[in-house]
Amino acid sequence: MTTLPPPIPGAPKNSGAMKPPPIGGLPGGNKPTVIHKEDYEHASKLPLIIAIVAIIASAALTIFANRISTWINVVGYLLTPFIVIICTGLDSVQQRRRATTDLYFLENRKITSALRGLSFLALLLSIPHIEAIASTVAAWVAKL
């Protein structure tokens, strides 16, 4: 008689859509199932990389090209809160979905925490862009 391993964190509690491999190996075989470290899939770092690039680009636009054109400020504004927060949401959705459907997926909470911190930084970085856009729109409205 074999005992089942402890439940997998994040596994669904329904009728058993996901079941771990049997302890004694596959039925009909006498070799136990061995799971290696490289068999696990990790969370994608792509949303974090995109968010970092967007923040660096927005900061560069704020420092070097802030008063050149209103369109540069619009691009900087789109880079900071929208792109970074979209990356944060995509990472959260991807990790939750994969953790409940893929038995060999390892969540990475550090990526999620970093993206949340970058979202706060992106909101702070969007303030100069908003101020520049608002001053341009106010000047345009004053001419009317």
Image: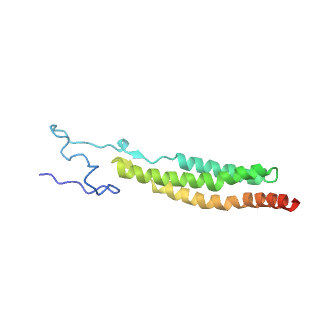
The residue depicted at 62 percent of the width and 54 percent of the height is 82
Query: Which residue is depicted at the point 76% across and 54% down?
Result: 63
Regarding residue 120, the answer to whether it shows in the image is yes
Tally of numbered tags: 0
Residue 111 left/right relative to 55: left
Q: Position of residue 61 (x, y in %)?
A: 74, 51
The answer to whether residue 1 is above or below residue 34 is below
User: Most extreme residue toward the front, as rendered?
Assistant: 144
Q: Quadrant of the C terminus?
A: bottom right
> Does the image show residue 106?
no
The scheme the figure's colours follow is rainbow
Residue 70 falls left or right of residue 39: right
Camera-side residue of 15 and 36: 15
Residue 8 shown left or right of residue 53 in the figure: left
Which residue: 17% across, 54% down? 3
Give how far across and how far down residue 53 sits, in percent: 63, 48
Residue 138: image quadrant is: bottom right
Q: Residue at x 86, y 62 (%)?
A: 142
Direction right: furthest residue: 143
Extreme residue toward the top, this view: 29
As rendered, which of 123 and 135 lies closer to the eye? 135
Residue 71: horizontal and vertical position, in percent?
76, 49
Asked if residue 99 lies left or right of residue 133, the reply is left
Locate residue 98, reporting x and y percent: 40, 49
Residue positioned most to the left:
1
